[in-house]
C-alpha cells in the first residue's frame, strides 16, 4: 500500500558501524525484533528526541547517556515502546544497557536504548537479555537492511538509503541511514526512529549542529496523523574511520546537502508508508510573514481530516483547503490575497475561485498518487514545505486493529 | 448511525417566532432546503459566529446586520455554504436579504442570512429568490421541526429541543432551539448552525451575555473532527411576547440553566450525529492549573486520530490517551501525577498503570456506546468537560463521498 516506495536493494556499509540483529519474540515470534549498532572508538554521536512531555523510559535513559558523551552502541527493539511504564520501565531500559555493555565489553552509560511499539506494557526483559547476549557475535558492517527490518512495527516497507559525498581533494565519505515509522507522525519527531551513520570524522558539537539543521527540512516537516509519540528519536553517528569534515572545510556544503537529502528521503519514506496512505502530498506554503506562520498553515492543512479524506477520494473540494487555512493560528489574516493551486492548476486567486478554473483539471491532478498543494498567503516572503498523506479506510482499520 | 439520538417528536412553538420552509433545489431537488424565521417587532437578537479567518459571505453580512440591531428575520439555506465565493458571494447573500425583506415587508438590513453546505460554489440565486417569494405566505409558529429538517446537510437526524422555565411569580417562559451539523465540528463553532428562540422579553445586551455564557459548556465544548467551518453561527432570539427576564430578576438563574441545558442538548446532539460516530465520549479533565489548560488537554485527546480509532475499536489502548495528553501544549508538564480512568475503572495513577488494573474492566467500559474518559493532571484545581465521537470507517466514507 505504500505510495511509490520499495525497500532499498542494498545499503552501503559504513566503516566503524556494525549492526547485529536477533529475535526476542517481544510481541510475537517469527521475526527479528532487536538490533544493536556498535560504533568505533573514534565515533561521535548526536541525537534529537521527542518533544512529548511524557517521553518514554528509553528516551530518558538515552538522553542521559548521550549527555555523558562516550556512546559506543545503540540498542533498539520493536514490538514494545516501554512507555507509560514508570520506574520499572526505566530500570528495564537500564538493565538492557547493562546487558549490552557486557556483551560488547563497554560501559552501560555508553549504550543508548531505543524502543518502539505498544505503549504501557512492560518489556519481556528475560527474553530480551538472552537475545542481547547473542548479538555480540553477529556484528557486521553489512547488516543495515536487517536492522531496518528489525525495527519495523506497522511499517510495510523497510526504509533506508545511502549517499556518497565527494568532499574535495579526492576524499569521499559515506552516509547510510535507516528509519521506521508510519503512524503517530508529526513534527518534532513521531513514532519514528532513525539512525544515520557516516564514516566521516566530525567533532560532536559539529555533528549535533548538522543533525539539527538537517531535521528542519526532513523529519520535522512530515505529518501522517498529527500524533506525536513518546519514543521518537533521530540519531547521527560519525565513526571517524574516514575523512575529516568540519564547518570550515571545503566539503562542508556537500556533506550537509547529502545529510539533509538522506534525512529527507528517509522522512518522506515514512510518509509514503503512512498508515493507510494512498497519496503522497507536498504542501508548499509561500507568501507568509515568517517561517513559523508558513509552517503553522502547512500543518493545519496537513492535519485536517476533511482535506485528508478529500485527498483520499481524489475530490478537488478546495473549499476544505481554504477553510483549513482560515482556521490556522495566524494573526490579522485576510482571505483577499490567498491563492491555491494543485500542481500547475491555479484554483483560487485573491481568495476567490478563478474564472478560468475547470474542476476537471484539478481532478486530474488529484487522481495522481503524488502532487503538490500550493498555498500563497500573499502577505510576506517566508515559506515552508512539508509532506503528508491522505486519510483512508485503511488508516482506520490499521489503528482499530493494531493490538488485536 | 447516530449514538442514542432520535428526532424530537414535537417542538414547542414560541410566541412571536414563526418559521416557513420551502424547496429551492439548491444542491438537488426533493427536499426543503430553505427556511425563514420571522420575529415579532419586539424581538431582540444575539449571535456568536465562527472564528475562522475566512468567514463565509453570509456570516459577514449577518454580522453587519446584527450590529445595526433591528433584526426581524433569519434566512437559512442548506446545500451550499456560499463560502470562498468572494464579492459575488456577498452580493448574493445581500440579494437574498433583499428578497426576504420584500416578502416580509421589512428592510434588508433586518434580515440575517445563513448558509451551510459545500464551500466554493455560487448560490443558485434565481431558484432561491423564487422560493423566498413563496415563504411569506407559509409562516407558522408550529414549523420548528420542518425548519430543523430543512437546514440538515450530512446530518442523519433532525436536531431540536424545548424547555419551559418557571421564572417565579407564576410566570413561565418557553425556549425552543434547533441545530444542524455533524462534520467540521470543533470549538469556537463548527459547520454548525443553531437557532434558539424564547418568548421572554430580554434586552439585547443581556441576551448577548446569556448566549455567550451558555456557549462555553455547550457548542464550544464539542469536537467531532477538529475542523472549524467558515459558516458556524449560533443565534438567540427573545421575541418579547412573554414575561420579562433580566439579570437581576428572580428567574434569571432558572432561565440561564434552561438556556445552557438546551444549548448543551443541541450541541451533544451534533456529536451524537457526528459523521460516522459509533460512540459518544465525555472527556473530563481535572487537576489543571487553569481552565484553559484543562480545555487544551481535553481537545488534544479529543482530536487524536489514534485515540479516536481506539474508541471505535473499543480497544482500551490507554497508552494512546497518555501520549496525547503528553503532547498537549502545557508548560512544565510531568507525567508523575497523571491519573486516567474510564468511567469508574481507574487505569493509570501517578503516571503508571495501577497494579489492580485489569484490561477486561476497561474493555467492558469501551464496549458501551457512551462513557467518560477522566484525566486528572494532579497539578491544580481547574477542570473542563467536553464531548466528542470516535473515528470510524464511516467517517472516511462520508467525507470521501460527500460531493459525489
Image (spheres, coloured by chain):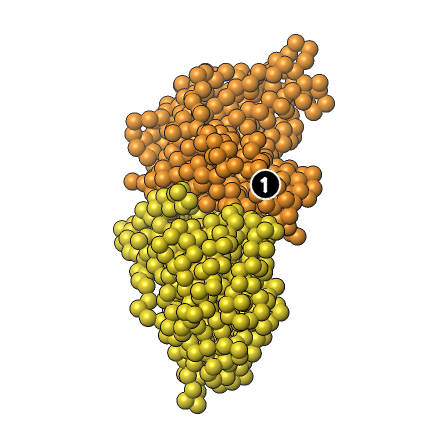
Chain colours: A orange, B yellow
Whether residue B282 can be seen here = no
Q: Quadrant of residue A10?
A: top left
In this view, the residue in front, B139 or A156, is B139
In this view, the residue in front, B390 or A141, is B390
Seen in the picture, residue A262 relative to B214 is either above or below; the reply is: above
Q: Residue at x 42, y 44 (%)?
A: B403
Seen in the picture, residue A16 relative to B339 is either above or below; the reply is: above
Q: Where does label 1 land, which residue?
A: A354
Q: Quadrant of the N terminus of chain A?
A: top left
Image position, residue A352 (x, y; %): 59, 45
Q: Residue at x 55, y 71 (%)?
A: B106
**Dot 1 lies on which element?**
loop
Apparent side of residue A25 relative to residue B105 in the rendered image (left or right): left
Q: Quadrant of the C terminus of chain A?
A: top left
Q: Quadrant of residue A382?
A: top right
Image position, residue B326 (x, y; %): 49, 49
Q: Residue at x 57, y 59 (%)?
A: B94
Q: Residue at x 52, y 36 (%)?
A: A358
Image position, residue A103 (x, y; %): 43, 25
Seen in the picture, residue A302 relative to B153 is either above or below; the reply is: above
Image position, residue A217 (x, y; %): 59, 32
Amino acid at each position: 500500500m505504500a505510495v511509490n516506495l520499495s525497500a532499498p536493494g542494498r545499503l552501503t556499509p559504513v566503516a566503524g558501524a556494525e549492526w547485529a540483529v536477533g529475535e526476542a519474540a517481544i510481541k510475537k515470534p517469527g521475526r527479528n525484533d532487536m538490533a544493536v549498532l556498535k560504533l568505533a572508538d573514534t565515533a561521535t554521536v548526536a541525537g534529537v528526541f521527542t518533544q512529548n512531555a511524557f517521553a518514554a523510559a528509553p528516551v530518558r535513559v538515552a538522553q542521559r547517556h548521550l549527555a555523558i558523551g562516550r556512546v559506543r552502541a545503540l540498542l533498539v527493539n520493536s514490538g514494545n515502546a516501554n512507555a507509560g511504564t514508570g520506574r520499572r520501565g526505566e530500570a528495564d531500559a537500564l538493565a538492557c544497557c547493562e546487558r549490552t555493555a557486557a556483551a560488547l565489553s563497554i560501559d552501560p552509560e555508553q549504550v543508548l536504548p531505543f524502543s518502539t511499539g505498544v505503549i504501557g506494557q512492560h518489556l519481556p526483559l528475560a527474553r530480551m537479555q538472552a537475545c542481547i547476549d547473542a548479538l555480540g557475535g553477529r556484528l557486521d558492517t553489512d547488516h543495515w537492511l536487517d536492522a531496518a527490518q528489525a525495527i519495523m512495527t506497522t511499517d510495510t516497507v523497510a526504509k533506508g538509503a545511502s549517499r556518497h559525498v565527494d568532499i574535495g581533494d579526492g576524499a569521499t565519505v559515506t552516509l547510510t541511514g535507516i528509519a521506521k515509522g508510519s503512524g503517530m507522525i508529526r513534527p518534532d519527531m513521531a513514532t519514528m526512529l532513525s539512525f544515520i551513520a557516516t564514516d566521516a570524522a566530525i567533532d560532536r558539537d559539529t555533528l549535533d549542529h548538522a543533525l539539527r539543521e538537517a531535521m528542519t527540512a526532513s523529519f520535522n516537516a512530515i505529518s501522517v496523523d498529527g500524533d506525536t509519540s513518546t519514543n521518537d528519536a533521530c540519531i547521527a553517528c560519525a565513526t571517524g574511520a574516514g575523512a575529516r569534515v568540519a564547518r570550515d572545510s571545503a566539503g562542508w556544503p556537500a556533506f550537509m546537502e547529502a545529510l539533509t537529502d538522506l534525512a529527507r528521503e528517509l522522512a518522506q519514506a515514512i510518509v509514503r508508508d503512512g498508515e493507510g496512505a494512498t497519496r503522497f502530498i507536498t504542501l508548499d506554503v509561500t507568501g507568509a510573514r515568517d517561517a513559523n506562520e508558513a509552517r503553522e498553515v502547512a500543518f493545519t492543512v496537513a492535519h485536517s481530516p476533511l482535506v485528508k479524506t478529500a485527498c483520499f477520494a481524489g475530490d478537488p473540494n478546495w473549499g476544505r483547503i481554504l477553510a483549513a487555512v482560515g482556521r490556522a493560528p495566524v494573526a490579522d489574516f485576510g482571505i483577499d490575497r490567498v491563492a491555491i493551486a494543485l500542481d500547475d492548476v491555479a484554483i483560487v486567486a485573491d481568495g476567490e475561485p478563478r474564472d478560468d478554473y475547470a474542476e476537471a483539471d484539478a481532478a486530474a491532478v488529484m487522481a495522481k498518487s503524488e502532487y503538490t498543494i500550493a498555498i500563497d498567503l500573499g502577505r510576506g516572503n517566508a515559506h515552508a514545505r512539508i509532506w503528508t498523506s491522505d486519510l483512508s479506510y485503511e488508516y482506520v482499520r490499521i489503528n482499530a486493529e493494531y493490538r488485536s
